[in-house]
Amino acid sequence: MKPLPFRYMKPQTLDEALEALGSGEDAKVLAGGQSLVPLLNMHLARPALLIDVNALEGLSTIEPSDAGLRLGTLVRHQTLLTSSEVRRAVPLLAEAAALIGHEAIRARGTVGGSIAHADPAAELPMVAIAKRATIGIRSASGSRRVPAEEFFIGYLMTSLGPDEIVEDVLFPMAPSPSGSAVEEFSERHGDFALVAVAAELSLGEDGRVARAGVAVAGAGPAPAAAREVEAALIGQASPEGVRATAKAVAADIAPEDDLHASASYRKHLAEILAARALERAWQRAKAASEAR
Amino acid sequence: MDQIGRSVRREEDRRLTTGRGRYVSDIVEGNMVQLAFVRSSRAHARITGLDFTKAQSMPGVVGIFGPKDMGEAIKPLSFGPPPESAMEPTMPCPLADGVVRHVGEPVAVVVADNRYIAEAAADACEVEYETLPAVADVQEARKNQVLVYPERGTNVAAVVTRKTGDGEAALKRAAHIVQETFTIPRVVGHPMEPRAVVASFDPVTGRLTVEAATQGAHTVKMGLAAVLDLAPEKIRVVVPDVGGGFGVKNRIYSEDAVAAWLAIRLGRPVKWAGDRLEEFLATNQGRDQVHTASLGVDEEGRIVALADHFLQNVGAYTPEPLIVPAQTATCLPGPYRLPNFEATVEVVFTHTPACAPYRGAGQPEATFVMERLLDRAADAVGIGRDEIRRRNLVRPEDMPYENGIIGRDRQPVTFREGDFPGTLETVVEALRVGTSPDDGKLRGTGIIDFMEVSGGVLFEICRLELGRDGVVSLFTGTSSQGQGHRTSWAQIAADRLQVPMDQVRVVEADTDTVPMGLGTFASRSTITAGNAIVQAVAPFLDKCREEVAALWEASPEDVLWEDGFFRLAGVADRAMDLRTLAVSRPLDAPLVEASAQFMDANTSFGMGCHGVRVAVDPETFQISIEDYVICHDAGVRVNPLLAEGQVFGGTVQGLGTAWYEALRFDAQGQPLNTSFMDYLVPGSAEMPDFRLVKRDFPSSSNPEGLKGLGEGGTTAAGAAFASAVEDALRPFGVKITSLPVTPASIFAQVKGGVRP
Amino acid sequence: MTEISMRVNGENRTVNVEDYWLLADVLREKLGLTGTHLGCEHGVCGACSVMVDGEVVRSCLMLAVQADGTEVTTVEGLGDPDHMSPVQEGFMQEHGLQCGFCTPGLIVTATHFLKENPHPTRQEVREALSGNICRCTGYQHIVNAVLRAADEGEKKAPSPR
């Protein structure tokens, strides 16, 4: 199927884009198009106006700072894979990006697009939750930053207003020594995950887990922080101990039965994948600690 | 030079790899309009109103037509004579005549300047429905609480039975009886090219020309003649490059009839290029059987009896009503010695798209049931899964072996050649090679046998014509959708004519070139067209001999044909090849042509064996295939490389059904997974590299020893995959009785994933 | 209607397009480049893959207006029947295609992949092509074709036309 007619604009400045977005017309923002265009083709999205933000300057930047790694909304998935900056500052992002679709999808798909689309099985929203990232949001009337956990509120639903745009995502740096890992289960290479888990651990001076960020995708209407697991991780000092905390993940997620998997299978996978991700994250954190 | 048996590369690949193919959707003609269909959003409803007002006024819309506009052309499509005559086809009208019976049935059609406008206008058409109760599940439908055709009083369209020996009654003599219920779900064929048609009408000649993505040019021609009340000679159907078929493009569809009707009505070329959603909703689907089957064996595991009661969901319309269920019933015994057999199938209507022949057409279902039962019986007897097969396969000394069932050629099923136990041993041996890493995964193997039924369906005609340039044109009614007929047919003709391959030009699937053709399906084309080609060569050469004799002023009996040259008996230096003959003939000499019609009266059977080793993650139940060995009797291989491609491709399609594919419907008949995001098909990363072991036995059923091989891979893969996965999961006691075998379906059985 | 200009297979092309038309349809219907096929129109099957500014994209997921000012390479631009590229030749020699409908997308994807990874393993090839569905071949001959092209590339650097 092919898109139904819409009006198209390609603003040259963010202000121009925001003005159009705030005009009250039924508008959608087009970035990489890898989620939106299928919806247009299937007539599931029927906007009157499409605002193509690809020409906007300054939204493709990758900026490391003390506060963390700031990714402009137009940074492409493929860039997350190839950027040494990203790999150094937030290795979790590079590892997760490798699992996004196929190269043809990654070449176009953007960080902001994935965050705003908020597919519950998508990798970047999950990493944003695990990293306690904040989403920079702009509208004609101003800007605000929202913690990822408050941003993703339901199935394909975010706290983004109709006149707002995702401007950037800020991923805080983990206190070192740290290690991270992503584990994903999909039926075929490149598919959306049935369930995925992202984990990052920082060790304290005593070699024990001092800080943990764990998130689960594909096990509920939105990506979820595994708070019970995170709490259980603090103070753990062995791979077995770290693995064992995965059992708590069931309390953190609320999957439902659907066409592809039962809720109980998703819970089961979340636990298995959490254990695997945590063990690898632990080993990496340990290696980082020993390298110091 | 011998051409048969060489892996000649396909000439069309120069075009197809460089973007110079010509598929129906690529065709552009002056003044052409495009179609989009308004399709039913309900599985069962009465249409109480159609309002095109809003859509009609959209710029670029040429017209919108409903069933009333089509008048006389609104009548059930005709498929032609069905091979099984026990039941008439139940076909849809080109546009639904008041009642819709599945989601996606065409209700009205938009004609517009391009497909974008047509789709937008179709979207704006308003259809008023009186929703009626619907039923999609075959077991529900059999309860007859909701009727697809109330006037019939039942959803059971037909009952077919096959029986040999004492049938089911013999089960009581068995030492072990294993019984299971097996489910093979609804799947979608999904050639990568969606169906498409371009129709144009020439008012000068009064002829309709239709270019269609079809497996049967003459089938479409006859179907159009019937629905449009046109004389068949007023219709020409031509088949350009076709992007896959797999059985589902082997009929006339509503869209073909509507496009042709509009071409006449509007006097403009009309194109309908369907899309993926339309493939999900409006193209024949396959499988969808539920079996309750019992196998009885003696103390040593020798088969005593097989009994099977099964249901075939045929959807709302059945273009070829009994082909699939009858073929399943016929193929259940497989390549085994089986003294007592009974199968009964109930063919059941539901409010779903037509479920009809799709690659394998009943054979994969039969093989899954029989091979699963043999695995069970082996466990019951306490012998290996390969051993039980060894003890039951038909042996060379049993041949010719008649199993007592009448096949699709209306002859008793007879295995005339092959070494079935030898084929099994070959695969067992091959699969032993190779080791697996010690990585904590569970491993299992599956070794299953199958029988590929090929040909045995009517006839093809081959016409040979000598061109002025010496090129021999070969015309036949088959239709390639990727099989590479142009190459294989040219190989056969060049071999027998003893000319280089480029001296043969193959023209197939153009109804103006041969009076009749059946098309490409049922793994019949190589057998039927191949023998027809060979049989056309002799009369063609006779004609040539007469021409040579005329040139030499000799008697035709004195003209000999040797090594590609005509020679005059007793005269050493008089020789002439075909090319010289062609250019030497006077301009007023009559056309040199000859044809032959080969009636494929006897089905060919090719036995094969698949052996597969899988690894299963004991925590997630992710499956990977580590080794896959195939032995598949292909008779005489005309082109071994193309033959290998058919086997590999067929096997991967079978693995799709085995591993991923199932179209699900809700209780109201709404299909739930109609995109490639939700309906998975095999991808390159998970598919294995196959190892092919060759043991070929030329067919005794046709003069050239040819066999079909396009369906055997699909037939075998589901049974092999299920067997291997179940073997790997022995520690969990998992029993696989339905497809697809997904990690989620395994988890549902092991409940919690903890090894007991 | 918007006027867009692209450099397509080395030629400058200017064309008026509706804003909501997909790049795939403009290539096929306005520029006559019907080698790019539409197999699903939802970004999964990969038949419509083309290169835009050197990257492989799904032309069913890109609006034609977005391709204004870009350099586009389709399967037609990689070779012609008399001058096939190593990948195209590989597909022919290894029987890497049957119906040929998915083939253009696979050839574009494989060509780009071999530029990035000239000496791949079988599994790397399989993963690189996993976003392109082929329903006919079972993939094995396609993998052979790409590896053959890689071997050819070693002998002589491919010269994209």
Image (tube, coloured by chain):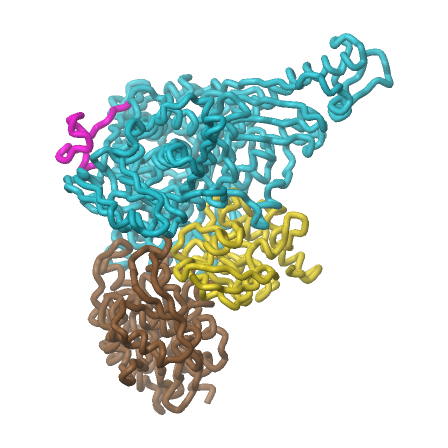
Chain coloured yellow in this rendering: C
Residue B146 within the segment the image draws in magenta: yes
Residue B506 against residue C16 in the figure, above or below = above
Q: Which quadrant does the C terminus of chain B fall into?
A: bottom left
Chain coloured brown in this rendering: A
Chain coloured cyan in this rendering: B
Q: Is residue A275 left or right of residue C156?
A: left
Taking depth in this image into account, of A79 and B634 the one nearest to the observer is A79
Residue with the most extreme left position: B145
Numbered-mark total: 0
Task: Please tell me in which quadrant of the rendered image residue B34 appears.
Answer: top left
Taking depth in this image into account, of A279 and C90 the one nearest to the observer is C90
Task: Write the residue at 44% across / 80% down.
Answer: A57
Task: Write the residue at 29% across / 47% down.
Answer: B56
For the question of whether residue B388 can be seen, the reply is: no
Task: Please tell me in which quadrant of the rendered image residue B247 appears.
Answer: top left
Q: Is residue B57 left or right of residue C33?
A: left
Q: Which quadrant does the N terminus of chain B fall into?
A: top right
Residue B502 against residue A24 in the figure, above or below = above
Residue B309 against residue C67 in the figure, above or below = above
In percent of width and height, residue B486 lies at 59, 34
Task: Write the residue at 36% across / 23% down.
Answer: B229
In percent of width and height, residue B217 lies at 47, 30
In magenta, the rendered stretch is B139-160
Taking depth in this image into account, of C126 and A116 the one nearest to the observer is A116
For the question of whether residue B688 can be seen, the reply is: yes
In percent of width and height, residue A58 lies at 43, 82
Task: Write the residue at 63% across / 31% down.
Answer: B505
Taking depth in this image into account, of B303 and B411 the one nearest to the observer is B411
Residue A218 within the segment the image draws in magenta: no
